[in-house]
Amino acid sequence: MTPDDHPLLLRPIALARGLSDDELARLVRRRELVRLQRGAYLGPDVAPDERLRLLATVAGLRVPGVVSHASAALLHDLPLWRIPAARVHVTRRPPAAGSGSARVHLHVARLPDESVAQVDDVPVTDVTRTVLDLARTTPFESAVVVADAALSRKQTTSELLQRALAEMGPVHRARRAARVVSFADGRSESVGESRSRVLIHRLGLPAPDLQTPVYGARGEFLGRCDFSWEEERTVAEFDGRVKYGRLLRPGQDPGDAVFDEKQREDAIRDAGREVARWIWSDLGAPRAVGDRLRRAFARGRRRP
């Protein structure tokens, strides 16, 4: 009972197909449809998620708008770390007014046509504008996670972000957005790496280089490290993953993989570098990560 190309069945589509409200109610009672919310239905085997709820809410708006902020990030598949997404964010151009509702967060702002894209046939702020909106309205760390991901996936560029921010003019919290744009780096390949960069910055430690090639004492390529500090002769990895080839080959015992990684780490040290590691839970203990890095820096400076 749902469209062939989409799991969401909206009431206007159902009525256009000849179904009545009574028939829709009967299908729900028979569990042939599941009511997601008023005027929106799913097949019985479709699990409701935030994206489907968002699309259903947008379809039910009496006054149309452009999906924006966290809701746009959700449609663009950008990571929302500690950014609430339960309410649907919609931007309307002036002179629109309103306070939104429990389900809809309404924004009123200038929005050039070139900053609007289409996702699932829904008007949505493009990735560049979405990053900037979140950079102005969410905490620095959360905004950096979004900006890094957009740059890493080549959905925008630093130049596009800077230009779009300048064209927005003296908007509220523009300086906050400029700080995020300046700090964002597309070489960061995960939420954890982005959070690690923010943590290192807040600790007042030197900014690392990212995705650095590492070679052994005989010049053999060992892979890439998430972070490196040349002067301190130190490299670091987030979450214990080491990008030095395949961790677990088909048929390989996990213990052998761990042993291989230990050998690779020894090879890095033999080549004259210290190694530091941390995992997701460590990001909640900044002092521990900072102490670990400072000890590695001190050892690295003592190397001949």
Image (spheres, grey):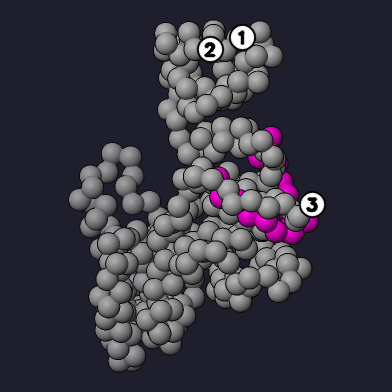
Q: Is there a contact, CB below 8 Å, between mark 1 and mark 2?
A: yes
Counting residues from the start of the chain, the first of labels 1 and 2 encountered is 1
Depth check: give the residue in front, 303 or 191.
191
Seen at 42% across and 8% down, the residue is 30
Q: Are there few (<14), some (14-19), or many (20+) residues within 10 Å of tag 1?
A: few
Q: CA distance from mark 3 to mark 2?
A: 38 Å
Residue position marked by numbered label 3 in the rendering = 113
Please, which residue is most extreme toward the front here?
98
Q: In x, y percent, where is residue 203?
A: 37, 81
Q: Are there few (<14), some (14-19), or many (20+) residues within 10 Å of tag 3?
A: few
Seen at 61% across and 9% down, the residue is 19
**Magenta residue check for 11:** no
> Which numbered dot is residue 24?
2
Quarter placement of the N terminus: top right
Q: From this view, report whether residue 121 is shown above or below residue 41.
A: below
Which mark lies nearer to you, 3 or 2? 2
Helix, strand or loop at label 2? It is: helix
Kindly indicate the quadrant of the structure image that contains residue 154: bottom right
Residue position marked by numbered label 1 in the rendering = 19
Seen at 73% across and 67% down, the residue is 168
Kindly indicate the quadrant of the structure image that contains residue 156: bottom right
Q: In x, y percent, where is residue 218?
A: 40, 73
Q: In x, y percent, where is residue 191?
A: 44, 59
Tag 3: amino acid: Asp
Tag 2: amino acid: Leu
Seen at 71% across and 46% down, the residue is 117
Q: In x, y percent, where is residue 238?
A: 36, 64
Depth check: give the residue in front, 231 or 92.
92
Counting residues from the start of the chain, the first of labels 1 and 3 encountered is 1
Magenta segment: 104-121
**Magenta residue check for 117:** yes
Counting residues from the start of the chain, the first of labels 3 and 2 encountered is 2
